Amino acid sequence: MTDIYEFEGKTLCNTNSVLGEGPTYDPDSNTVWWFNILGKELHELNLSTGEKKVHPLPVMASVLARIDAGRQLIATEEGLFVRDVASGNLTFYAALENDRPENRSNDGRTHPSGALWIGTMSKRAENQAGAIYHVASGKVTKIFNGISIPNSICFSPDGTIGYFTDSRINRLMRVMVDPQTGLPSGEPIVLVDSMDDPGDIDGSVVDADGYLWNARWGAGVVDRYSPDGLRISRYKVPAVQPSCPAFIGVNADRLAVTTAWEGLDEDARSAQPSAGALLELGIDVKGVFDPVYVI
């Protein structure tokens, strides 16, 4: 039986993104980073000072991975770029789908080995137009094809298990992964089949105990699953379209979640002023920090 909890958290940032996505945390600077994909923005919130910055981008981007204190790797509609933290300058790093200008990047996460998994999708969300790629030391390898809306890319803490979904199908997939390279070492299997449940499986992250936290787009909740696929708890949030969670705080013991107002009409937006905000659940978690990308 799933335990259901009312929202007892808070708003970390009330800047309402059209499509808030890709949150990650930098423990060295105590800073949360996330994207407004459709608004072509990178958002930055320092948790120590409360200082908030919005960095305009020339392209739609969706995933950020730390390289070191001065550099970040970001995935965009035009490929992968290294971003200089101080100046914001972007330097081209690797192509994803140069032959698919109708596609953009979507969900992604760094594997404990230092490799990156990144998904792509059609800007018009066409069926099976996207894929998931493995990126390591600048080499890009397609690992899963025919995906409409790639999401829930995350890994067990030891790097032996990878997760992903196609949100259009709503089956959370589990695949064995080589912990040294981050490449799949087996065939994906269905861990959770929620095709008939309200809402869509969106972004996910795995905690230190191997439990998966998933933002359920359209249902206004964050679900927690055991490693064997049992949904054990559900946390309500004041936005119907939560998109992705992230562990934050110096001890990775807090959980933030991005949200979106994309597709909501005026009445729906008025009814949920938190749509598009960065929220914190207000619960104690035992998280892990996202690994750095090894360039």
Image: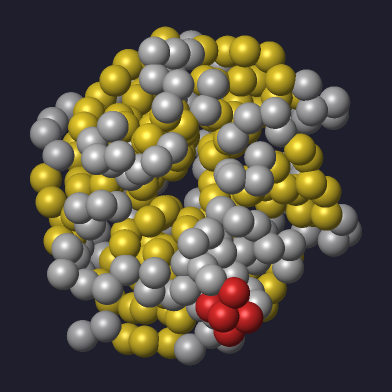
Q: Which colour scheme is used?
A: secondary structure
Vertical order, 27 against 212 (above or below): above
The location of residue 77, given as percent across then percent down, is 52, 28
Kindly indicate the quadrant of the structure image that contains residue 48.
bottom right
Nearer to us in this view, 116 or 92:
92
Looking at the image, residue 7 sits to the left or right of residue 213; the answer is: right
- Quick one: quadrant of the C terminus? top right
The location of residue 237, given as percent across then percent down, is 51, 78
The location of residue 194, given as percent across then percent down, is 19, 65
Vertical order, 166 against 72 (above or below): below
Residue shown at 38% from the left, 74% from the top: 219
Residue shown at 30% from the left, 39% from the top: 126
Looking at the image, residue 120 sits to the left or right of residue 184; the answer is: right
Nearer to us in this view, 147 or 144:
147
Looking at the image, residue 118 sits to the left or right of residue 22; the answer is: left
Q: Please say whether residue 10 is visible from this viewpoint.
A: yes
- Quick one: quadrant of the N terminus? bottom left
Residue shown at 59% from the left, 45% from the top: 38
